[in-house]
Image (spheres, grey):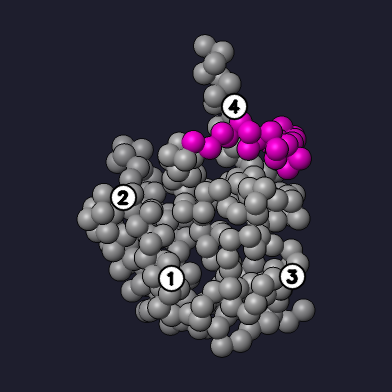
Amino acid sequence: MAAQVDNIGMFIKGMTQPDELIKYIQARFPEEEIQQAYTQMVEASKALGRDEKITPLRAFWKLLDRSYQKKTPPMQCGEGCAHCCHTGVTLTQMEWDGILKLVEEKGIDLEEIIERSQRTIKKVREVLKSNRNIDQVDWHNLVINQPCPFLGEDQACMVYEDRPLDCRLVVAFRGICDSKKLEHAQRGVVVEEAIGSTVVAKLQHDQTPKFKRRRFQGTQPLRLFQHWLILWQDKKSSKNKK
């Protein structure tokens, strides 16, 4: 299937290979513009974080939202429209830490989240316990068409304010989606999308104590929501046994 694009971005449905989005972004935005946007966004996120006394990551989310508001048509995504919330969502340690902070602020019961998400959590746990090469596992396919653990019964995101980049970069401009196949969703819309994952990785790198830092490679490890929940639960169980 040929990738489907228009003057706004690339349709999710048209993406048949992961590198198609990269090629599309490279063709749409000059390398100089991408590099300049990356440098500016990292510094702006840190500065806004200091000014508003929030984390650099929350500051980046604010700046990303502003970019969509300034550069794109009105998004049709809204509370209760959760078709794009039935797929695998991966996030970094920094994004997960931000969600844990929000969970504490809102009094969300993670044990309850885990209990109602057992179907996908069990699948992920089984893979983690197997002898399979984890790097070769198609994690998204493992949980596809299943609701995100943080999708509430009202079809609204329970951690919307701090939802990860994976969620923020799937947007829809042409009416309400009518299936879970993301036909109406798009990516590659703004240059901030091209540099988003690297900005998050850099912010995480820079907040890591210097004695623990490794040379910055432009990325950070990603794990599914279900994997982070498993790690959280295992850590809690280990503490209770002591």
Q: Residue at x 61, y 31 (%)?
A: 111
Mark sitting earlier along the chain (1/4): 1
Q: Residue at x 37, y 79 (%)?
A: 32
Extent of the magenta region? 107-130
Tell whether position 125 is magenta.
yes
Q: CA distance from mark 1 to mark 4?
A: 35 Å
Up-down relation of residue 82 to residue 119 (above or below): below
Q: Residue at x 56, y 88 (%)?
A: 7
Q: CA distance from mark 2 to mark 1?
A: 20 Å
Dot 2 falls on a residue whose secondary structure is loop
Q: Which residue is mark 4?
A: 234
Amino acid tagged 3: Asp
Q: Residue 206: image x %, image y %? A: 32, 49
Q: Residue 155: image x %, image y %? A: 65, 54
Tell whether position 242 is magenta.
no
Q: Nearer the viewer, mark 1 or mark 3?
A: 3
Amino acid tagged 4: Asp
Q: Which residue is mark 3?
A: 178
Mark sitting earlier along the chain (4/2): 2
Tell me the crowding category of disc 1: few under 14, some 14 to 19, or many 20 or more residues within 10 angstroms, Cα based: many
Amino acid tagged 2: Ile
Mark sitting earlier along the chain (2/3): 2
Residue lying farthest bottom? 7
Dot 4 falls on a residue whose secondary structure is helix
Q: Nearer the viewer, mark 2 or mark 1?
A: 2
Q: Which residue is mark 2?
A: 54
Q: CA distance from mark 4 to mark 2?
A: 29 Å
Task: Find residue 192 and name its label.
Answer: 1
Q: Quadrant of residue 112?
A: top right
Q: Is residue 222 left or right of residue 192?
A: right
Up-down relation of residue 10 to residue 229 (above or below): below
Q: Main secondary structure of the magenta part?
A: helix
